[in-house]
Image: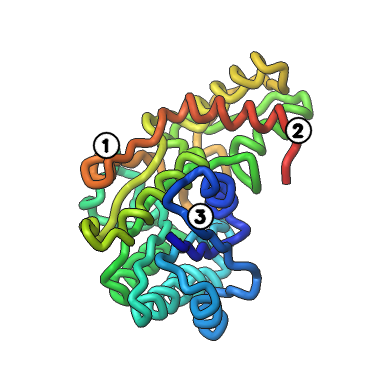
Amino acid sequence: MRILVTGWHSQIARALVEVAPATPAVTALSVGRPALDLCKPSGIRAAMMAGTPDVIVNAAAYTRVDEAEEERGQAFAHNRAGAAELARVAAARGIPIVHLSSVYVFDGRKQGAYVEDDEPAPVNVYGRTRLAGEQAIAGANPRHVILRTGWVYSEHGQNFVRRMLARARDGCPIAVVDDQVGSPTYARDLAAAVLAVAARVVDTGRPPPWGVYHVAGDGSTSWFGLARRLFEVSRTLGGPTAELMATTADSWATSAPRLANACLDCTRLHDVFGLRLPHWSRSLEACVTNLLGDGSRD
């Protein structure tokens, strides 16, 4: 199985590179470099011609939630128009696409975890761009699987886990929001699931039902609960810890509204693909162990 991955800077793309060598189904995985710009159709077509992939994994996205409020044109160009062009080019060549989307397509007001059939109702520009991207993908390429996820963390890039460890080294107490809940998702777990889904979509003998699926770490917690468990693990490994203070979302000024509930129900993914990600607490321990064992990462 030859996979072309977009979004080489993303946590998910980095994780795919790390996980793919241990995946028997993957014969070649190429990650689009800066030449593959989703806002430049010619680059998309050239990358598709050069790689001749069996499946596209679109991990590229504009993800700056607050900045999207002011950079609407850029966010929509990347998350909607670019995704649509990628799907169109793939469809023209008979190539299925696996597209990574976000829990931000919802409004965060539901009691309980979101299922795929819940009505999307994004509350900020970023969420609207992600929903528009889903709709564009579905309209451009009937052979699509859209994977919604959230609260992704890894050993690389900018994410909550790395920020908390960095702040703990300053030795100051940290205030963390305790009235927003979600399903923390380790990028390596997500990457393994993406590769399994990709293998299924190129299996012409048993293609899956195309459409939308939720994929996230098992269980749920608040940002405060995630930070507390993070420092428990770090403490046992001799890493940095900090005093935590629970606070509310109202005490933080952000340009874009956040979701009070970002929990995802992943039952459909298990029923169709037989996949269930590990519990977030166990995966967090693996990530922190890697971070502290390897020192600071980029």
Q: Nearer the viewer, residue 52 or 243?
A: 52
Q: Nearer the viewer, mark 2 or mark 3?
A: 2
Residue 162 disc label: none
**Extreme residue toward the right, this view:** 170
Q: Nearer the viewer, residue 102 or 290?
A: 290
x and y percentages locating residue 78 in the rendered image: 51, 71
Whether residue 279 is situated above or below residue 60 in the rendered picture: above
The total of numbered circles placed on residues is 3
User: Seen in the image, is 43 located left or right of residue 180?
Assistant: right
How has the structure been colored for display? rainbow
x and y percentages locating residue 72 in the rendered image: 52, 71
Residue 285 sits in which quadrant? top right
User: Seen in the image, is 188 located left or right of residue 290?
Assistant: left
Question: Residue at position x 42%, y 57% from top?
Answer: 100
Residue 288 sits in which quadrant? top right
Which numbered disc, 3 or 1, marks the residue that appears first in the sequence? 1
Residue 111 disc label: 1
Tell me the CA gap for discs 2 and 1: 39 Å
Question: Circle 2 sits in a helix, a strand or a loop, which is it?
Answer: loop
Which numbered disc, 2 or 1, marks the residue that appears first in the sequence? 1
Dot 1: few (<14), some (14–19), or many (≥20) neighbours within 10 Å?
few
Question: Residue at position x 51%, y 55% from top?
Answer: 256
Question: Circle 1 sits in a helix, a strand or a loop, which is it?
Answer: loop
Dot 2: few (<14), some (14–19), or many (≥20) neighbours within 10 Å?
few
Q: Quadrant of the N terminus?
A: bottom left
Residue placed under numbered mark 2 in the picture = 295
